[in-house]
Image (cartoon, rainbow, N blue to C red):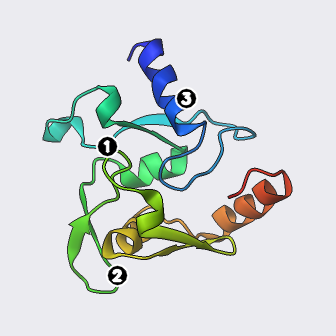
Amino acid sequence: MPASLRSQVIERAENRCEYCHLHQAGQEASFHVDHVMPIKSGGETSVENLALACVSCSLHKSAKEFVLDPETNKFVPIFNPRQQDWADHFQWVGFRMTGLTATGRATIETLKQNRPIILAIREEEQILGRHP
């Protein structure tokens, strides 16, 4: 991937994971540039199909397009930061992400957004002025 394309994605995301909003500053590992629609499904390596993702979100998302909503037990599309607004699907309750929609709930569950270590990181990030 050209460095200029990666830079565009990072700048658009303001150095934040587009799934969980974690800030890149202070993180040991560099964030990934994620194909929102996986290459295996025809997704292109273009700015319109790329999102900045922290390592945790990127690895948990992998090439998933549909994920299980824990409330309805039905498969729904995973959150798409290129086509959907984050605030329509998620909200913060303290340091926990909560889902406002089936897509929100399923994405949180799939990406393991409320693990104890993630909550501790968010608390520390708030002290540093980077959360939410």
Q: Is residue 98 above or below residue 112?
A: below
Residue at image point 38% right, 17% down:
1
Crowding at label 1, few (<14), some or many (≥20) Cα neighbours within 10 Å? many
Marks 1 and 2 close (CB-CB < 8 Å): no
**Disc assigned to residue 80:** none
Left or right: 132 as drawn, with respect to 77: right
In the rendering, at what x and y percent does residue 4 appear? 46, 14
Identify the mark nearer the N-term, 3 or 2: 3
Residue labelled with disc 2: 70
Identify the mark nearer the N-term, 3 or 1: 3
- SS under mark 3: helix
Amino acid at the residue labelled 1: Val
Q: Is residue 70 above or below residue 86?
A: below
Residue at image point 35% right, 28% down:
47
Marks 3 and 2 close (CB-CB < 8 Å): no
Residue at image point 68% right, 64% down:
117
Identify the mark nearer the N-term, 1 or 2: 1
The residue nearer to you, when weighing 12 against 71, is 12
Give the Cα separation between the discs numbered 3 and 1.
17 Å
Give the Cα separation between the discs numbered 1 and 2.
22 Å
Residue labelled with disc 1: 36
In the rendering, at what x and y percent does residue 63 appear? 28, 47
Q: Is residue 47 above or below residue 127?
A: above
Residue at image point 71% right, 61% down:
122
In the rendering, at what x and y percent does residue 29 appear? 63, 36
Q: Residue furthest left?
A: 42
Number of numbered callouts drawn = 3
Residue labelled with disc 3: 11
The residue nearer to you, when weighing 120 against 128, is 128
Which of discs 1 and 2 lies nearer the camera? The answer is: 1
